[in-house]
Each structure stands twice: as structure tokens, then as C-alpha cells.
Image (cartoon, helix red, strand yellow):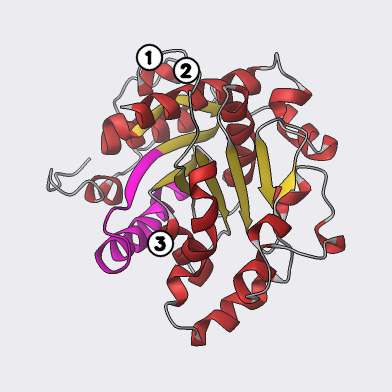
Amino acid sequence: MSSVDSNDKWAALRAAQVPPADSEGDFSSPDPESYTGKRDIPQPQPLERHGPARVIAMANQKGGVGKTTTTINLGAALAEYGRKVLLVDFDPQGALSVGFGTNPHTLDLTVYNLLMQEDVDIDDVMMKTNVAGLRLMPANIDLSAAEIQLVNEVAREQTLARVLRPVIPDFDFVLVDCQPSLGLLTVNALTAAHSVLVPLECEFFSLRGVALLLDTIDKVRERLNYDLELEGILATMYDSRTTHSRQVLQRVVEAFGEKVFSTVITRTVRFPETTVAGEPITTWAPASSGARAYRQLARELIASTDK
């Protein structure tokens, strides 16, 4: 990897290069934690009271990297550990809503109505899920119109933050599932968030594409949300059988160090099954490797938040 300014935490990833297959390097271990590092993750303690919530934007402008899967299953795992969690579907495709068995096209009220209609209350939009302590704000294709309609609004980038404000004291975590773009909706999510969690597929083009997201995060930090942090990089769709996955994972760790979660989400057929079932993997296949991975991720997130 070429030399970079050590003070620029984004520059390392922009400069990261995945070497050709015949290059030097030890990529022999299939265990992802041999790259991310095994960490002592404490068992979460019960809470005496809830709130205020930490708002986390799940963002990556590349589609198909596991944003929605991570939002669903991380949210469910956090709820298992006694945290009150609100999931916000901020993608007009409504995949997060579908993931809980909801048909987004039949909904009378969605996050779109909350954003655009002053007479809609957030309690009217929130839905219960099959997981105790986990609530959902659904979305459908109507949300795509908000990106156009918000352009002429005053403080348009802060609309989501404004509508979420009344429930921040009631939850421990708010996870916002962003659409795969860097448009006004994603900027709204970044402006409302305390931090950004970036699911990153263990594939070279995903690695290079993250630079665009990091540029957007920088601009939001400078102009709209001075306290926005990088929560972490989550490696997803890891395939231990391929050298390429190991190479990409090692380069991400070299670029971001401890900002890469120790937990790595491996490929499994269980995740598509949960979409059909309309429930998280933690309840659909609670003993599966995917469920265990998201519980470990939840413990990591709780531990970093409690510091």
C-alpha cells in the first residue's frame, strides 16, 4: 500500500490496492478474525433506564452489500440484549419493511408521510415487529418523491433529524437503512446520525467505491453535522474459500485498523431464507452462524457505545 498521511483516516482506504494473486503476502488463513483480530467483547449488562438513542446510519452507495440485512439482524440482536431499537426504512425500495413481512405497497402511512405532512405524528408511522423491543418505521416507493419535494424546503438536510427528535429519549439505538445512493435522503440520514456504519462486501470494487461515501461523510461533517463519526466498517459476504476475500479484508484492516469490526459476516443461504420468512435470522435460525455473528456484532456495538 502506498504511503499516505497518517492523519487522514480516509486516505488510507482511497490508496488501498489489492495485489495480484501472485503477489507476496500471507492470505492462507480462512478465519476472518485472523485479520480483524480477536477481541474480548463483554456480555452486555441490563439497562436500568433507556435512552437517549444513538442514531446510526447504515450507509454504502453500492447496492447489494448487506445494508438491509445488517439493519434487520443487528437491530434484532440489540433488542435481544434488552435494548430498545427503532429501525428506519429510508430506502424507497422498502426492503427493510419487506424483511419484516410487511407489504410496503399496502401501507397508508410511511416515513414519507412523516417527512412531508405536518399533521402526521411519528407514533402513527411506527410499527411493532415480531421482536420485543424492536420497532419499525416503514417506507415504500412514495419516499422517492421526497427527494424531489425536499429540494425547496428550508433546512432540507435536517428533515429526518427533526422528525426523529421526539422519540430519541425513548430508544437506545436508531438504525437508519439508507438507499444505495449519495442523494438528499442519504445526506438527511448522515445529518441525523451520530455515526455511520459501513457494510462492505469483501470484493475489490466495493472497497474502491467506499471512497465516494467517505467524501460525502467528510462534507457532511464539515457543513451539517460536526459530530458525525465513523462507527465502523463491517466486512460482509466473506467467503473463506477465496483468496480475494482475504486480500480485501486484510486491506480494509490495514486502512482502518480498529475501526473494522472484529465480527465478519460470512456468506450463507440462511439470509435469503429469512427474507422469505419475514423475520430476522436471530429468530428464524437462532443457532445459525449468521445469528451468532450478528449477536457478536451487537455486543461490539454496545461495548463501544458504553465506553
Quadrant including the C terminus: top left
133 up-or-down from 26: above or below: below
From where the camera sits, is residue 241 visible?
no
Quote the CA–CA distance across marks 1 and 2: 18 Å
| Residue 70 point in image, percent of width and height | 59, 38
| Residue 88 point in image, percent of width and height | 61, 52
- Crowdedness near tag 2: few (<14), some (14–19) or many (≥20) residues, C-alpha within 10 Å: some
Total label count?
A: 3
Residue 69 sits in quarter: top right
Looking at the image, which is closer to me, 255 or 195?
195
Quote the CA–CA distance across marks 1 and 3: 33 Å
* Residue at the image position 37 percent from the left and 32 percent from the top: 305
* Secondary structure state at the residue bearing disc 2: loop
Question: Which dot marks residue 38?
Answer: 1
Contact, CB < 8 Å: mark 2 with mark 3?
Answer: no
Tell me the residue that label 3 is attached to: 191
- Crowdedness near tag 1: few (<14), some (14–19) or many (≥20) residues, C-alpha within 10 Å: few
Q: Residue furthest front?
A: 49
Magenta span: 204-232
Tell me the residue that label 2 is attached to: 44
Amino acid type shown at disc 1:
Lys
Quote the CA–CA distance across marks 2 and 3: 28 Å
